[in-house]
């Protein structure tokens, strides 16, 4: 279940405030590392920012969770 940081990250991303979205996704991961959703969302954010290395890293981390 996401914390307020996950929700803020989605709102920041929606409003194209990608720097704050990234910060909030990372805070969400720090607080709730067993949730795959912020890893997936962060990978999508890095795709938008044309950062394929980071996108690949977080996509890989998201895939390590049981389905």
Image (cartoon, rainbow, N blue to C red):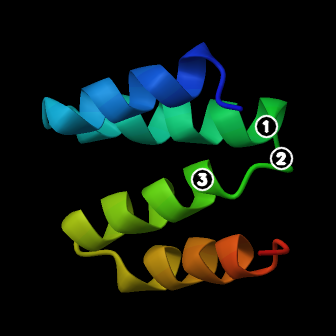
Q: Residue 30 versus residue 51: which sits nearer the camera?
A: 30
Is the N terminus in the top left, top right, bottom left or bottom right quadrant?
top right
Compute the Cα span from label 2 to label 1: 6 Å
CB contact under 8 Å: marks 2 and 1: yes
* Image quarter of the C terminus: bottom right
Q: Which residue is drawn at the image coordinates 69% and 58% (left, top)?
A: 36
For mark 3, what is the residue? 37
Provide residue 37's location: percent of width, then percent of height: 60, 53
Q: Nearer the viewer, mark 3 or mark 2?
A: 3
Q: Is residue 32 above or below residue 48?
A: above
Q: Residue at coordinates 26% horizontally, 41% vertically from top-left?
A: 18
Locate residue 23, reporting x and y percent: 50, 33
Q: Which residue ends up furthest to the front in the rendered image?
A: 67
Give the number of the mark in front: 2 or 1.
2
Q: Earlier in the sequence, mark 3 or mark 1?
A: 1
To which residue does mark 2 refer? 33
User: Under tag 3, what secondary structure?
Assistant: helix
Residue at mark 1: 30
Characterize the local packing of mark 2: few (<14), some (14-19) or many (20 or more) Cα atoms within 10 angstroms: few
Q: Is residue 29 above or below residue 41?
A: above
Label 1 Cα neighbours within 10 Å, binned few <14 / some 14-19 / many ≥20: few
Residue displayed at 46% across by 24% down? 7
């Amino acid at each position: 279940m996401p914390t307020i940081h996950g929700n803020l990250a989605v709102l920041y991303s929606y409003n194209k405030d990608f720097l704050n979205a990234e910060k909030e996704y990372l805070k969400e991961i720090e607080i709730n590392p067993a949730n795959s959703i912020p890893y997936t969302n962060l990978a999508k954010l890095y795709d938008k920012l044309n950062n394929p290395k980071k996108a690949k890293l977080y996509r890989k981390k998201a895939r390590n969770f049981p389905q």
